[in-house]
Structure formats: C-alpha cells, structure tokens
Image (spheres, helix red, strand yellow):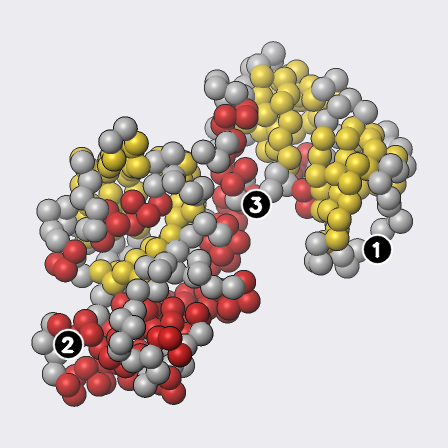
Amino acid sequence: MPEVRLEKVTKTYGKITALRDASLEIHSGEYLCIVGPSGCGKTTLIKSIAGIVQPDSGETYIDGESVTPLPVEDRGTGYVFQEIALFPHMNVYDNVSYGLMVKGESVDGRRGTVTEMLDMLSMRGSSRFLPSELSGGARQKTAIARALASGSTLLLLDEPLGALDFKVRTVIRYELKRLVKGLGLTAVHVTHDQEEALSIADRIVVMKAGRIIEVGPPDELYLNPRNLFTAKFLGEANFFACRVLGLTGKTCRVDAGGATLSIKRREDLDLKPGEDCVVAIRPEFVKLVHGRWSRENTLQGTITEGSFLGDARSYGVETLNGLKAQLKVPASEEEPDIRVGDEVSIVLPEEHMLIYRYPPEGLEKELALE
C-alpha cells in the first residue's frame, strides 16, 4: 500500500497555470477523492502522479522515493481513464490480460490473474464479449479490472464513472471502494460529482484554479469547512454578508442586514468588532415556521418559491430585511400547507452557522467556480 507525496508541484500551459505549488500527502491504503470545478487542475494533478504529465517544478514521491524523472511504465501505477479506453477488437479477457502479456507473463500466469479480477468484478460470464457488446457499466468494470491486473498497488482513477448514468454510477462507486479496500490498495479518484466524493472518500481534496484549497474527511469538510469555497462547492449553502458586532465567550454577534444573529465563534479566526464577515448555513439546517416568530436567530419573510425534490421539499425565502435563503425540509416530515406568498419565519441555529472573514476580492469572486 504505497504512500504518495507531492511537494510544490507546478504545471503551466502557456499563460494558463494548471497546477500552482500543489503539495499533498496521500496515506497508505487511503481512498482519496479530488474534486473541484472544470479546469481547476484535478486531472493535471493525477496525471502528474502517474507520470503522464511532467511538471515544470516540484517533486512527486512514492513510498519516499522521488519518481519525478521516471516514465509512466516505471511508476507502478494503474490508471483508469474517463473515456473507458478499451481495445475495441479485443474481448474482455484479452483487454484485461493485455498489460500482463506486454510484461511477458506466461499464459497460465495471466489466466489466474485475469480470472481473479473478473471474478471480483462479477465479469467472468462476459469474458468473451467485445466492448461494443457491453453496457457502459460493464465496460468501465473491464477497464478497472485491466488496471488491477497489472499488479499495481496505487490505483489512479480519472473521472472513472463520469460517462455512466446515475443509477449505474451509484452502484459501481461502492463496488469500487469495496474492491480497493479488500485488495489493500491506495486509490486516488478524480470526480466532478461532490455526492460521489462525499459517499466513498476517506478524505477529500478540494481544488480551485490550480490550487489545493482544503483537505479533510468528508464529514468535516461538509459540516465544518474552513474555506468559503469548500462550503460553496461541497453541497449547497446560504451566504450572508455581515458585520461583527461583538464577541462574548464562545459567541460572536453579527449584523445581517439589520438583524442580529448569534454564531458559535471559531477558535482559529480572530475577528474584531466592526470587521466585515460572511455567515453560511446549509439549507437543511434552516428551520421553517409558518407565521411570525420573535426568537433569537429568527428572521421573518415570505416564501418566494417551492419545489419537490423527492427526498425533500425546497423553499426560497426572502426576509423582511432583504436577505434571501434556501432551505430544505425532509419529505418525511409533516408540515403546514406552505405556499408561495405565505408569511413565514426561518430559524438559523447557532450551532449550524459558519463564519468566515470577508474575502478581500469580494464574496462573488471567492465563490465563483472559474
């Protein structure tokens, strides 16, 4: 189970910086997901590990040894492409065994390895099928089996499920993680699907504009992100531009469009009274009450939109002081008959609100996906 370390890896293409001083440690046996908007450097990062891309500067280490000068074939990695790059004239068995054949493995040796891989992925019955005769999910399983058959203990997956429909993608992602953990591999999985990353990763790397923004376990990055962009990109969140009024004990009081909110202080953030800040809260943590309430952290407003999402109902609210908020109510919860135009109150629980220093370049630019 290899460990991987990147130290200040930078890669430019003309005037575009695809990676900027990227430093990262990937633990032995870890399933790591890399997420971020299109063009943020995810694929360049994983290709730098594989050796497909040669960085302009920086070092890549596998198990403590620099592999920066080594070609792809000498790095001992298995790479799965988004495009499901199988040989169209070869059947499943031959596709999976190809790498072993190139390495000079005997026919008997190849047979045992390939059979084991196909069994693990429930593909033995399809071993004589051509790629054109397989479903999208089966083709991607074949590509994964081919990477695993090489004997690599470091598996690099570049949007491996991106071409599959939602139902198939959901099933295969769990199969893939079970397989990686069962074989004791280290896996780096690039994806644009935040739900996919949150559901299978041991840790998540969030990237933006060639930089690594934040790294941590899925629950930590979702519930307590330290970076505004992480809060924006992983899931959904409401953001309010505020100003610090005062700090008492473990509580920070802020002005939000004329309303006072109490928020749990962040120990790592030294805010001062009078300083601009940003408050964020996930839609599922906003509480909805029909009618008017006058309690702490409660704002009055009007329902401006509503939709049914299957597992939840989503509402848009515009408060009397001009703030706009989205909230979600689980479909299983009983609630009053709420319609667009109704007067309501929204409760913002102190323990679920997040506070950040106001970004110097403005909130809109900080949250932009480009």
Residue drawn at x 77%, y 31% is 318
Q: Position of residue 328 (x, y in %)?
A: 72, 46
Assign a secondary structure to mark 3. loop
Assign a secondary structure to mark 1. loop
Q: Which mark is residue 334?
A: 1
**Around disc 2, counting alpha carbons within 10 Å, would you say few (fewer than 14), some (14 to 19), or many (20 or more)?**
some
Between the C-alphas of marks 3 and 2, the distance is: 44 Å
Can see residue 54? Answer: yes
Residue drawn at x 66%, y 16% is 245
Q: Position of residue 299 (x, y in %)?
A: 79, 29
Q: Position of residue 106 (x, y in %)?
A: 12, 83
Quadrant location of residue 83? bottom left
Front in this rendered view, residue 156 or 287: 156
Between circles 3 and 2, the one closer to the viewer is 2
Q: From the viewer's perspective, tell me whether residue 208 is left or right of residue 167.
A: left
Q: Position of residue 197 (x, y in %)?
A: 47, 54
For the C terminus, give its image quadrant: top left
